[in-house]
Amino acid sequence: MNDTAHIVGWGHTPFGKHDNIDLEQLIRDAVQPALDSAGLAPEDIEGIFLGHFNAGFVGQDFTAALPAVAMPEFRHTPSVRTENACATGSAAIWAALDAMGSGRMKRTLVIGMERMNGLRTPEVAATLIKCAYVAEEGADPAGFAGIFGGIATRYFQRFGDQSDALAAIAAKNHSNGMHNPYAHMRRDFGFDFCRHPSDKNPFVSGPLKRSDCSLVSDGAAAMVLSNEPVSGARVLPVRWRSRTQVNDFLPMSRRDPTRLVGARMAWQKGLADAGATLDDLSFVETHDCFTIAELLAYEAMGLAPYGEGARVILDGVSARDGALPINLSGGLKSKGHPIGATGVSQHVMACMQLSGTAGGMQVADARMGAVFNMGGSGVANYLSVLQPA
């Protein structure tokens, strides 16, 4: 690939329910640490790329203009907003990389953010369902939990009850999230709680229980990208070996939603472009909006054949001490899933691993990692293969 951009700084707010924090504060809390770690000031940034899904979570549109409200030094800095469902943050990263690859900009700031908790639960569901094909799928009262509950139901019908695997994925990610200071829910629930329905863990849709669903979260993450070395940076830079986007049909009626074909193609192309295999990866941060999504991701990345993804978690392959640790950050399941922030957050988590600054999340000798971020039910598929610069 021709991109010369490096990630030279990053910032991340705690994810959670932030009743008294507005979007401007989220921006400041993510951007200032990103600038500080890069050793740069606002005037060094030539363009801002903001990932913000919104779709009714907050009343403010035109949020590309908010960085300058949050930090007046950005008053005259070009700024645009991207939206691509749950892959909104990755879309913002790609837009920044494209601007830099064209030669138009040398240093950019990428921000991903979302504030979701201003709405009641039914309103959240009604907002998220807009990421589906509304003409055919928009009436599901459970929102996107209903979409993935339906996918899990079809998978179970085809391959048998996978409840043990889904519970093991949930338990793994919550255990990993205990080590992430930014995680929304730092609580180790254990396999038994995640496996068995209860008053505190009821079924939500199909075979999916509450413990199978990512959290409704507020938060932001930011990265500084540079085409040139930054002498004052306080973190080790990270670069892309490859970056890939592959799309698929939005209507699930036009494809088999139990097969993440677009994701599979992204993984095949991304690894080939990087000149790497799964064996070269030290870790993966993958999109687990629901536990069934992580199971399907195992198959998409080639860890198991179609229908056999359960083996990956049940055999310990994706465990913290497994052959390929997956979601050491706790994933969306524990870390949280503020829609527009997720893709940027995943890249920040990978940068922390590759720079040796992940603290309790750190995997030993991290030399190469991958980030997979998915918009919709396997529709917009983004893969980054990253390594220390």
Image: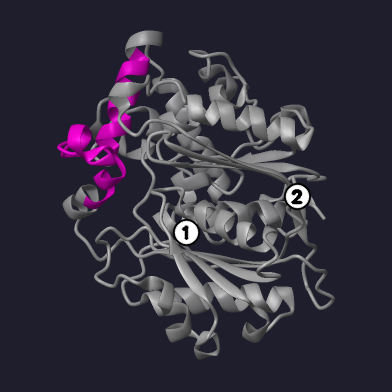
Per the image, the residue denoted by label 2 is 2
- The mark that comes first in sequence, 1 or 2, is 2
Percent x, y of residue 338: 41, 57
Which residue shows up at 59% across the image and 79% down it?
A: 32
Residue 225 is inside the magenta segment: no
Instruction: Please tell me which residue lies in front, 56 or 187.
Output: 56
Percent x, y of residue 291: 43, 33
Left or right of residue 150: residue 225? right
Residue 149 is inside the magenta segment: yes
Q: Secondary structure at mark 1?
A: helix
Percent x, y of residue 35: 65, 77
Query: Residue 66 appears in which quarter of the rendering?
Result: bottom left
Percent x, y of residue 168: 49, 29
Q: Which residues are magenta?
A: 127-156
Per the image, the residue denoted by label 1 is 341
Image height check: is 268 above or below 234? above
What crowding class fits label 2: few (fewer than 14 Cα within 10 Å), some (14-19), or many (20 or more)? few
Does residue 187 show up?
no
Image height check: is 220 above or below 304? below
Which residue shows up at 47% across the image and 68% down it?
A: 80
Which residue shows up at 79% across the image and 33% down it?
A: 275
Q: How is the image coloured?
A: one colour
Location of the C terminus (image quadrant): bottom right
Q: Secondary structure at mark 2?
A: loop
Tag 2: amino acid: Asn
